[in-house]
Every structure is written in structure tokens, then in C-alpha cells.
Image (cartoon, rainbow, N blue to C red):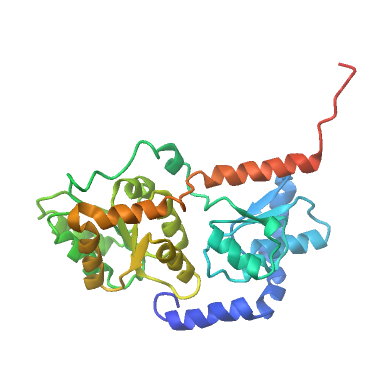
Amino acid sequence: MINHAPKLWNRVYQWIDRGQVLPRRLWTLRIPLRRLEALLASERPTVVCSTYPVYPFLLEKLRQDGRIRAPHYTVVTDSISINSLWWRADCAGWFVPNEDTAEVMAGAGIDPARLHVHGFPVTSFFSEHAALLAPPDLRTSPPRVLYIAHSGMLHAAETARRLLAEEDWEVTCAVGRDAKLRDQLEQIASRRVRPAQVLGWTDKIPSLLMTHHVVVSKAGGATVQEAIAARCPMIVNQVVPGQEEGNFVLLQRHGGGVLADTPDAVMGELRRVFASRGAAWRKWRSALEPLARPGAAAAISRHILFDAIEAEGPTPVNHAN
């Protein structure tokens, strides 16, 4: 539905957001419920933290049945356009990626004291290499463009071909497991004078984001948040209605990206942002500074562990020793 019937998917997403039927039925997922209970019994956690909105309902059911006592926290991985599934099941607290999202959830009735803005938990690579990796100065070096193509993305092949035709830019295309598209683009790249990379599936996206000036991709939650952590401005060329709309709004609201949903629009925005030796690009990158929290995962972990230690109380002192 997302790729071929986005308007239908948007109606489904809105039905889930407004409806009461689905949340009341999630506890009937017997197999996931039994597996989750077995995992909790095996691990015996002091605290539970989840990043998927179905788990709070399963944990709530286990808690009601007396089968779990550990407090549960939810990490919200969407921004601004937050489906109510994220907060309908109660938990000890919610970790949200930005103040914009906290305001939306507080407006929906969530106690602000239980909303913690620590950022989106990206890999520690971003914080560990923040002072080591950066794109070259546009005043003396050619622009570097990263294009991340996802399955089903509109105009993927045409956008990639247009990017590779720009000999004045260094271009990296990551096409995932689309072997056919990768073969086509490698043939085009081999005829270029300036370097170009065509990658299949890769785990190097963090380093690529940190060393390229702009990323072109759809407004997926993780992609947008990793781009923010890398302070890599984003040209969004596809927005899935519903869950991805808020991700783009976040970039647009803070001046760290734009929407360009055709190959022509993508190329036009890139030429604009690279004009005058990157004057507009420097403004985009600076706009992402206040949003970037590359150490979010560690901050969330510290918060959870601190709360767990406080809940357990002071460690008894053995005066006999």
C-alpha cells in the first residue's frame, strides 16, 4: 500500500490513529505475547524499553495479569505526526526525538513530566566521529551528493541517472538490494571523469552522511534522524502519507531540508543550494545544529538506568564486614 496505493495507506493510518478497535485487539496476538513473556522470564529485566508501538499493549496485558513488574519506557521514533498508538498504552515514560514532538504529545494529554527529549537513538558512530568526519569546504572542493534509493521509490532510476550526469559533483548512490538498478548505474558511473560510487546494501550510511554535503532520500524516520545527527541537509523526494509527514515537517520547520518530488525538482534544489560556493548549504547545516543529538542512545540509557537504581533504593550496607 505504501508504494502502490499511498492514499489508501493514509486512510488506514488515520483509521488506526482515531479508532478504538485495533488497540483493544492487540493483546490477542497470542504468539508474540507468549514469546515476549518467555523472553522477560528468561532475562528478568530491571526495566524494559521498546521502540515499536505494539509492544506497550502486550506489556500492559502482561502487567495486568501480574506477569511482569519491571517498569516500561517507550522510545518514540516518529516526529510531529504521531499516531496515537504510541501513547494509548500506559508506561513509565516516553523518550521523544525533539521538542516539537513533545509538544504534540503533551497537547494530546500526556503528562509533560513523563516526556523526555533526549533525541533519536542513532548509532554511537555519530557521536564518536563528530570531530573527525565532515564534508569538505564547498568554497574549495566539489559538492558531494548522497542518494539513498528505497524499494518502490518513485523516479529512483531517473533521479540516479540525472545525478550521475553531473560531472561537477561527486556522487554516491546506495540502492540497497536492487541488483538491476545497481548494474545500470555502475555502467553510467564507469564513464564519469569525477569519482562516483554505486553501492548495494551497506552499513556505511553513518559515515557517508557525515562526509557528504546533502542526502537525497525519502522521509523515513531513521533516515531523517540520522541525517540530522550527521548535520547533513536533506532533499526529501518522497513522503509516505501519515507517519512520514511529520519527519519532513520537522526538517522544513527548522530549515534543514526541502521537498523535491521529481527528478527536475531535485536537481534544481541541489543547484540552488550549491550556488555561490555553498552559501545556502551552510545555512541549512547550521539550522540542523540545535536538532542534532548524536549521543541520544547513551542519554536514554543513562536516564533509564538512573530511574531503575532510584526505584530499587540504596544498597544495604553490611556492617559486619
Picture quadrant where residue 224 is located: bottom left
Tag count: 0
At horizontal 59% and vertical 67% (from top left) the residue drawn is 104
Q: Position of residue 291 (x, y in %)?
A: 47, 53
Picture quadrant where residue 220 is located: bottom left
Q: Position of residue 23 (x, y in %)?
A: 68, 73
Judge left or right: residue 129 versus residue 166: right
At horizontal 47% and vertical 61% (from top left) the residue drawn is 221
Q: Position of residue 205 (x, y in %)?
A: 36, 50
Q: Looking at the picture, tell me which residue is in the foreground, 305 or 117.
A: 117
Q: Looking at the picture, tell me which residue is in the foreground, 315 or 270.
A: 270
Q: Is residue 90 above or below residue 261?
A: above
- Give the quadrant of the N terminus: bottom left
Judge left or right: residue 189 versus residue 200: left
Q: Is residue 217 above or below residue 140?
A: below
Judge left or right: residue 104 versus residue 231: right
Q: Residue furthest right?
A: 320
At horizontal 80% and vertical 52% (from top left) the residue drawn is 69
- Give the quadrant of the C terminus: top right
The reply to whether residue 170 is in sight is: no
Judge left or right: residue 303 versus residue 275: right
At horizontal 32% and vertical 57% (from top left) the residue drawn is 215
Q: Position of residue 194 (x, y in %)?
A: 13, 50
Q: Looking at the picture, tell me which residue is in the foreground, 3 or 275.
A: 275
The reply to whether residue 310 is in sight is: yes
Q: Residue furthest top?
A: 321
